[in-house]
Amino acid sequence: MWGKIFKNNKMLCDHVAVNDNYELSRTKKVFEGLDEICREFNLSVPLWLDSNISEFKRISKTRFRADSFIEEIEFDYLEIQVIEEDY
């Protein structure tokens, strides 16, 4: 999973979380990837709003904006995207 932080349409930083545990479900891998990305960026894990869930189901990508975070953020959004799937 690829996590990126954006402000003013510019990527400030990114991190790729790799999970090769084939025993885990896709959902578990997504949550673990998001946890790793948030640790790397020193962020609390954002809340999954209905819009995030719907978007992620459709295109394996979503953006977490300020309303998904409990604390104030100093960027516009955190974007996560599945970049490779196990088959």
Image (spheres, rainbow, N blue to C red):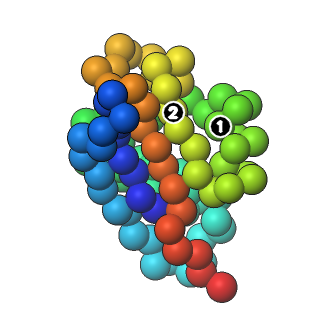
- x and y percentages locating residue 73 in the rendered image: 34, 20
Query: Dots 2 and 1: beta carbons under 8 Å?
Result: yes
Residue at the spot 37% in from the left edge and 62% down from the top edge: 17
Residue at the spot 68% in from the left edge and 56% down from the top edge: 59
Q: CA distance from mark 2 to mark 1?
A: 7 Å
Q: How many numbered badges does the structure rendering display?
A: 2
Q: Is residue 44 visible?
A: no
Instruction: Say if 10 sits above or below 29 in the image.
Output: above
The residue identified by callout 2 is 64
Q: What amino acid type should be assigned to the residue bearing mark 1?
A: Asn
Q: Which one is nearer the viewer's eye here, 59 or 40?
A: 59
Q: Which one is nearer the viewer's eye here, 35 or 5?
A: 5
* Quarter occupied by residue 19: bottom left
Q: Secondary structure at mark 1?
A: helix
- x and y percentages locating residue 26 in the rendered image: 64, 65
In the picture, measured across the screen, residue 49 lies left or right of residue 30, that is right
* Quarter occupied by residue 86: bottom right
* Quarter occupied by residue 9: top left
Q: Residues within 10 Å of mark 1 (few under 14, many from 20)?
A: some
Q: What amino acid type should be assigned to the residue bearing mark 2?
A: Phe
- x and y percentages locating residue 46 in the rendered image: 49, 31
Q: Secondary structure at mark 2?
A: strand
Q: Which one is nearer the viewer's eye here, 24 or 57?
A: 57
In the picture, measured across the screen, residue 47 lies left or right of residue 36, that is right
- x and y percentages locating residue 48 in the rendered image: 61, 34
Q: Which one is nearer the viewer's eye here, 73 or 20?
A: 73
Q: Quadrant of the C terminus?
A: bottom right
The residue identified by callout 1 is 52
